[in-house]
Amino acid sequence: MRNRTKLSLRVPVPKNRPGDAPDFSGMTFPDAGTARRPEIDVRAHDISDLAYALIRVLDSHGRAVGPWDPKLDAETLRRGLAAMLVTRAYDDRMYRAQRQGKTSFYMKCTGEEAVAIAAAAALEREDMCFPSYRQQGLLIARGYPLVEMMCQVYSNVKDPLKGRQLPIMYSSKEYGFFTISGNLGTQYPQAVGWAMASAYKGDDRIAASWVGDGTTAEGDFHHALNFASVYRAPVILNVVNNQWAISSFSGIAGGNESTFASRAIGYGLPGLRVDGNDFLAVYAATRWAAERARNNHGATLIELYTYRVEGHSTSDDPSRYRPSDEAKAWPLGDPVERLKQHLIALGEWSEERHAAAEKDAVETVRDANREASAIGTLGEGERLSVKTMFEDVYKEMPWHIRRQRQEMGV
C-alpha cells in the first residue's frame, strides 16, 4: 500500500533574521542555585537531569547561591577578572591590527571569556588542554607571554611556530596548550587519546578539550565520546554552545531537538549543562569533572551555554544572518560584567578599581603590541628564513630533502 501523504523535508531556520528585533523570549532558564550537585562518583544515568538543566551560581544581584557555589576567595576572583579583561583587550588590539593589514586573520572570543579562563583556574597547571580557536584565554590565564602570542599572529621572525600555522592557531607544550587544528573536531579524539595514555602510564594529569556546537555534528565528536566511555578516560569534553557555527545557527547541529549535554547520555557519560557566562558556574562544573577524572570515574561532557558576540572571524559579517543588536539582548549577560558585580557585592571591588583594571589591561596589551610590531608584522620586518621549512619535521632529515635544501642554497 503506497504512502498517500506527500513527504516533506524540514530544514531548521533561526527564529530571528537580519532586520528583525532580537527575541529570546522562547528561552527559559532555571533560577541560579537550583541545580543539584551530586558526588563525583555518581553513576552517569543517575544525573541525566543535569544534561537538561542549567547549572548557575550567580543570581541577578551578583550573589553566589546554591550547592555549586565553589566559594572562591576574592583574590582568585580578581585574577580571573583581570585575565578576562586582558583577553578582551588583546582581542580588540589584534582585531584592529587585522583591519590595518598587519595580519591576515583573527578570531575574537568576546562574550565567551569565562569559558576558558574559569576552566584554566579550575584545572591544574600540568593538565593538557586541547582547544579550539576561541580559547586564547587559556594561554593568557596561564601566563603565556602576550608578545609571543602576537608574534604568532603577525607571523614574524619571532613566531614560535615559524609561520606554519594560521594566525591564532597557537601551540605551547610548556603551557599545556595542544596545537590548534583548522580541521574542526580533531582535538576531541586527540584529547581522549592523550588522557588514555596518561591513565595507562599511571600519570596524574588529565586532559580537557573544547569544540563548538556545530562540531558536534562531526564524526570525531562521536568517536571521542565512545572511546572516552569505553576506556573511562580522564578527560573533560567541553561543547561551547555559542549559538552559531559561522553563519549556521545551533539548530542545524541538532540544538533544537535536545541539549548538546544530553548527547553524553547515550554513551553512558555524565552530561552537565552550564551557564557559560557565569564564571563561578564554569569553574565549579570544571572542578567537579576534573575531580571525577582524577579519581578514575571517567570523562564528563559539559555544554557551556553562551553567545558569540562578534563575528565568527574577521572574514565574517554576522549582520548578514542575525539581527545586528542581538548580542546586547542575550539574556545571560556579559561574563565580565557579571563577575565584576559579584566582586562588588562581596565588597572586594568597585567601579573605580574596575576602570583602573581595564586601563591597565589595555596598557599591558598596548606595550606588548608595540614590542611585537617592532619585530615585524605581516607586511613589514624581517622574514623567516626559507631554511626553517625543513626544521622540526623529521627527526633525521631524509637524503632527498637535504639535497633539495642544498639546491636552494640554504
Image (spheres, rainbow, N blue to C red):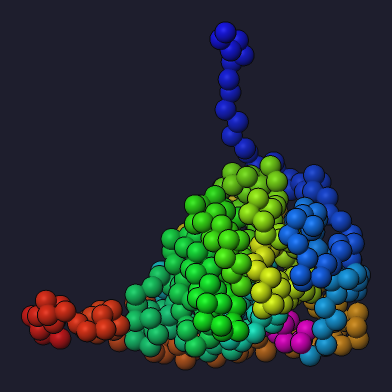
Numbered disc total:
0
Residue 147 locus on image (x, y percent): 49, 88
Left or right of residue 9: residue 43? right
Does residue 85 show up magenta in the picture? yes
Residue ID at (59%, 44%): 252
Extent of the magenta region: 76-86
Which one is nearer the viewer's eye here, 380 or 329? 329
Nearest the viewer among 111 and 287 is: 287
Q: Is residue 145 above or below residue 261?
A: below
- Farthest-out residue, top: 1
Q: Residue at x 76, y 87 (%)?
A: 76
Whether residue 163 is visible to the viewer of this picture, yes or no, is: yes
Q: Is residue 376 visible?
A: no
- 393 in the magenta segment: no
Q: Is residue 382 left or right of residue 252?
A: left
Q: Is residue 302 left or right of residue 164?
A: right
Q: Is residue 306 above or below residue 395?
A: above
Expressed as whole percent of the image width and height from the top left, the position of residue 62 reads: 88, 73
Q: Main secondary structure of the magenta part?
A: helix
Q: If the image is split into quadrants, where does the C terminus sit? A: bottom left
Reply above or below: 404 against 23: below
Examine the image and state in which quarter residue 345 appears: bottom right
What residue is shown at x 43% (from left), y 60% (from top)? 183
Residue 378's x, y, as percent?
37, 77
Is residue 308 or residue 382 the one in the foreground?
Answer: 308
Residue 1 image position (x, y, % from top left): 57, 8
- Left or right placement of residue 166 versus residue 10 in this view: left
Residue 366 sits in which quadrant? Answer: bottom right
Q: Nearer the viewer, residue 370 or 271?
A: 271
Q: Residue at x 47, y 83 (%)?
A: 172
The quarter of the picture where residue 342 lies is bottom right
